[in-house]
Amino acid sequence: MSWFAILVLAAGAYFFKLAGVLVGNRITNDLVQRSVSLIPPALFCALIALQTFERDTELVIDARVSGLVVAAVATWRRVPFVGVIVLAMIATAMTRWFAGT
Amino acid sequence: MTASTHRRDSVVLGAAIGLVAVTFGVLASTAGLSLVKAMALSLLVFTGASQFAAVGVIGSGGSPISAVGGALLLAARNSLYGMRLSERLSAAGWKRIPGAQFVIDESTAMSVAQSDEVAASEAFWWTGASIYLFWNAGTVIGVLVGDRIGDPNVWGLDAAFAASFVALLGPHLSSAPGRVAGLLGAAIAIVAVPFTPAGAPILLASLAIGPALLVDSRRSENRAS
């Protein structure tokens, strides 16, 4: 990867971040404001789904699913943040170990 | 959450994501990147999914244009996060210009999960700084250690990111519009995976906001009548 490619990517990535930050609080339209407030649930649920079922732009079901289920149950049972992450990792690692995949 | 919880959680999240950065460092080194170049990506690009995508394309012999293009598509969602965090960051004045570098999945999630404004602002800066430190330290370790550590996913590391987001999701799903946005967003992203390039499914998921808005306005109509 050339230095030129790295710097283009760095400039582009920072531009996206800064543009959102600078444009966002100029929005006074109520409908747009309500849309913006719904960005986190839409994108975070999509991220969770992709992180669990996507592998190299294909859909797969593997050990990560057990991690997701354990994370959901642990959150529901009000396990502290670090516990949710550790339990999900243990579940995924154990499933992977037992299934041998 | 109490005052100290979000600080501790931001450090915990940073440490977990730092382990993911070790994976990135290993991948970058396997793809032929020098230590300095891998560090440049983590310091300057600092958005995990884009870095993995770029290095993945280079590693499999793809062109720099498709590597940068795909990575930028993945980075575009940070604009939406920036818009969401904008009002909160405007209090920081000029500091939001360098602070924008911290606008990523994790800092947004941790910030919008807080119930009061002071904690939300602090959660953004703490999580951003914590992940920046751990992410860059992890990258260096990954490149130096190389592939000697084997596959880190044996330890279930690839479940850490999704699990942390599940833990932060609660407040968003407490309202009907939030639930509609979440369920539809996940469904759209999954359906889009086989047909679109990496990065597109997550952007398409924002279309879920439309139906969620309808639910939102129907509810406010009901309250008004």
Image (cartoon, coloured by chain):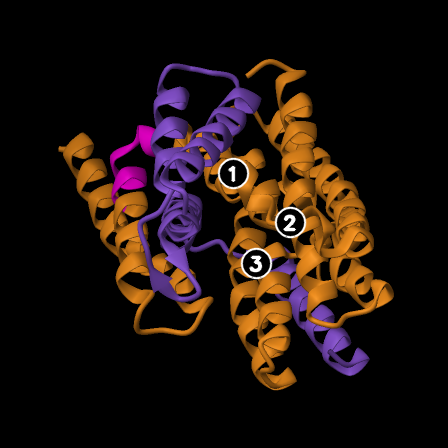
- Residue name at image x 67 percent, y 56 percent: B24
Q: Which residue is mark 1?
A: B156
Circles 3 and 1 on the same chain? yes
x and y, in percent, of residue B96 in the image:
74, 50
B175 part of magenta stretch: yes
Can you tell which chain is drawn purple? Answer: A
Q: Residues within 10 Å of mark 1 (few under 14, many from 20)?
A: many
- Residue name at image x 81 percent, y 68 percent: B37
Q: Which residue is mark 3?
A: B49
Q: Residue furthest right?
A: B36
Left/right placement of residue B77 relative to residue A64 reads right
- Residue name at image x 48 percent, y 53 percent: A28
Q: Which residue is mark 2?
A: B150
Circles 2 and 1 on the same chain? yes
The quarter of the displayed image where residue A10 is located = bottom right
Q: Which residues are magenta?
A: B173-180
Spatial CA span between label 2 and label 1: 13 Å
**Amino acid residing under circle 1:** Gly
x and y, in percent, of residue B193 in the image:
33, 65
Asked which secondary structure carries label 2, the reply is loop
Can you tell which chain is drawn orange? Answer: B
**Amino acid residing under circle 3:** Ala
- Residue name at image x 38 percent, y 27 percent: A70
B61 part of magenta stretch: no
